[in-house]
Amino acid sequence: MDTKGLLRGLLRKHDTDLSDILERQWEIAWNEWLPAFGVDVGKQSFNSSPHLRNIERHLDEILAMRDEAGNFVRLQIDLAPVEIYVLLAAVLFHDIGRWTATGNHGQASWECLDKFCEALGFPSKKMAHCVGRVCRFHSPPKEEDEDPRSRSRYVLSTTTIDPHGRIREEVVAALLFLADNMDSAFTRVLPDYLLAGKTMQGVAAFRSAIRGVRVDWSARMVCTALGNLVDKSRSELLPREILVGSESLASLRKRRKTGRHGEPHPPAIASAVLAAPEVWVFEQNALEKGVRFTVALDNPNKAWPGEACLVMAMSDVGKNARDLAHIHLALSSLGMPLRAWLLEYQDRLFNSHGAETFEPVFSKDYLRETARSMWDISTHVFGVSQFTYLNLADAMMDPNVEKVRRAVKRIERVTLGMDGGSPAIWAGDDHWKWNCRIEHENASCRLASLASVDGILDNLGVPHD
């Protein structure tokens, strides 16, 4: 395991005793228990080294505050050395319950740490219980599967362990929960030589199409970035069946607007990501906890259907968006709220229903106000073609120039190709302008209308329910 990560380095710098304990626990893991359950056969994904490495990498990226040159300045959240240790130990042990679990693996992880704390290298039972509670929190029970009386075990508090100090379990657990959900990465998918000719399952195929997952604190969102699903779909293995959430599939099949001739239009994300959404052919049967559908596509190239992978992506993002509710209060208390989990494709943002949307740090009213202020400046100041974001921020009486800049860039992106013409807005790094558009009938040039821009903004989906 790489010991040069940001959090590991900080732990080594500030508490060598806890750092040595963590290294010893990794040594025990490598030699004794990690090889025993390294692969999730059902999902055809690694649950051991690649998954744990990805979580640590996500935590390093989430927590690092860097200067313009990319140099580390400090952590976004002040963590004591013992809190860093508990976080990194929870990364190592959070899935250990999968080894024996038949039900909730988070609870099974707590039980394993309680029973084998000394063999697993913990310095005390109290420390093992603290790490175990953080592990348990990352896998909350489903309402229908858990006795409500047992929910009290998922309540976290602040614990003090001498001589190391105070641990804010809720903060540490929120960070683990977030980073674990972020790991929908291709590095977890089994390579072809380990598939041994078996059909690639839905989760593995979905993960293979993910380009990255990132947290954007300033925009109050997490983004799952999609690659080109049509290109990614090529495989010698044609999957036959996928289980997905019924809500996401309904978004593609039923939540469409009807065209002039009664023909359904696919949601915005399908038009953006898929080359030929009109070839969708699904045979579906309703299930109690989702929809299982069989790909019934006559495909001589044995290509994974991009639309099926898109449904998986929407379903995953919808689940992650609902999971954010478990950690929203903990992150908000630190001044770092996350309000939405969105899909990102070529700088466009989509919610789990497939509707194009915007950063949750904005509201539709804020975007409309930005557009109207841009229009007022452009139509009342003559002899100037470009304006600075500071000009616009002053007109809006908003001291946050970076927020204004970001709003203009989002308006530019959602209005690209408006009415089939040239872009309505141009947004550079330092300047912006409201473009003139050529009308070919009379060869005249006029500004794109504010009403057209407002109409597009009105039709955007909301980033979170």
Image (cartoon, rainbow, N blue to C red):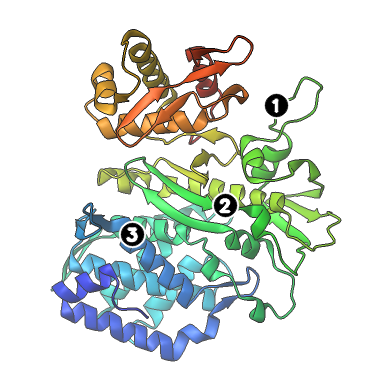
Q: Badges 3 and 2: C-beta atoms under 8 Å apart? A: no
Task: Decide which of 43, 190 is in the foreground and name it.
Answer: 190
- Give the amino acid at mark 1: Lys
What mark, if any, has residue 213 been given in the picture? none
- Give the amino acid at mark 2: Asp
Q: CA distance from mark 3 to mark 2?
A: 21 Å
Which quarter of the rendering shows the N terminus? bottom left
The local secondary structure at tag 1 comes to: loop
Mark nearer the N terminus (1 vs 2): 1
Task: Decide which of 327, 343 is in the foreground and name it.
Answer: 343
Mark 1: give few (<14), some (14-19) or many (20+) Cα within 10 Å: few
Q: Position of residue 230 (x, y in %)?
A: 68, 53
Q: Quadrant of residue 89?
A: bottom left
Mark 3: give few (<14), some (14-19) or many (20+) Cα within 10 Å: some
Left or right, residue 257 beside residue 408 = right
- Give the amino acid at mark 3: Glu
Left or right, residue 329 beside residue 181 = left
Q: Residue furthest bottom?
A: 31
Tag 2 residue: 316
Tag 3 residue: 61
Q: Is residue 266 above or below residue 439?
A: below
Q: Nearer the viewer, mark 3 or mark 2?
A: 3
Tag 1 residue: 257
Q: Position of residue 310 (x, y in %)?
A: 65, 49
Q: CA distance from mark 1 to mark 2?
A: 24 Å
The local secondary structure at tag 2 comes to: helix
Question: Residue at (51%, 45%) from the top-left corner?
Answer: 344
